[in-house]
Image (spheres, helix red, strand yellow):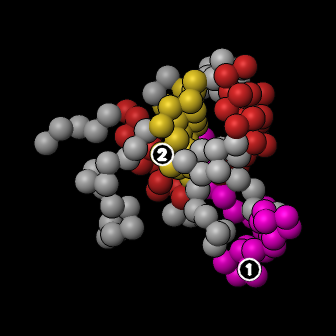
Amino acid sequence: MERISWDQYFMAQSHLLALRSTCTRLTVGATIVRDKRIIAGGYNGSITGGDHCIDKGCYVIDNHCVRTIHAEMNALLQCAKFGVPTAEAEIYVTHFPCLQCCKAIIQAGIKTVYYAEDYKNHPYAIELFQQANVTIEKVALDESVIDLRTVKY
């Protein structure tokens, strides 16, 4: 049996985090990595102690759920809350980041964005990543590696 690559390992962590998502529209996970070590993780969900989409439904304005904090933002905020630097780090996300998360990722000093699935890839987000010299790379998680929804604990 071959070991999975680092990219597959960190992407699998993001898929695992996505299982904690409380938004019913899309489950997303994000893992921030520096020097091949996980420094933070996040999933899309409501503010701490707030109402969750799975309990109260999505609060949709202009086709966006405003109740939900995106996975990338939650991971970045976790670093901010605990004083963990993100400069020169990498982020693994289950879906291509939205425009607002793109800007936050750039401002946080993340150098590489790995994502598993295309999702409304905004052309301006791609342009901003290029302007900021942030590498974006699609990394598929081989379904034969692990099916996270059928793992028994």
User: Residue sitting at 45 percent across and 27 percent down?
Assistant: 36
Q: Is residue 62 magenta?
A: yes
User: 89 or 116, which is in the foreground?
Assistant: 116
User: 16 or 121, which is in the foreground?
Assistant: 121
In the rendered structure, find residue 116 and report the number of the disc placed on it: 2
Q: Is residue 47 visible?
A: yes
Q: Amino acid at mark 1?
A: Gly
The image quarter containing residue 127 is top right
User: Residue sitting at 32 percent across and 34 percent down?
Assistant: 5
User: Residue sitting at 41 percent across and 48 percent down?
Assistant: 12
Q: Position of residue 77 (x, y in %)?
A: 75, 43
Image vertical order of residue 60 relative to residue 120, above or below: below
Q: Which residues are magenta?
A: 40-65
Q: Amino acid at mark 2?
A: Ala
Residue furthest to the bottom in view is 56
Nearest to viewer (mark 1 / mark 2): 2
Q: Which residue is mark 1?
A: 57
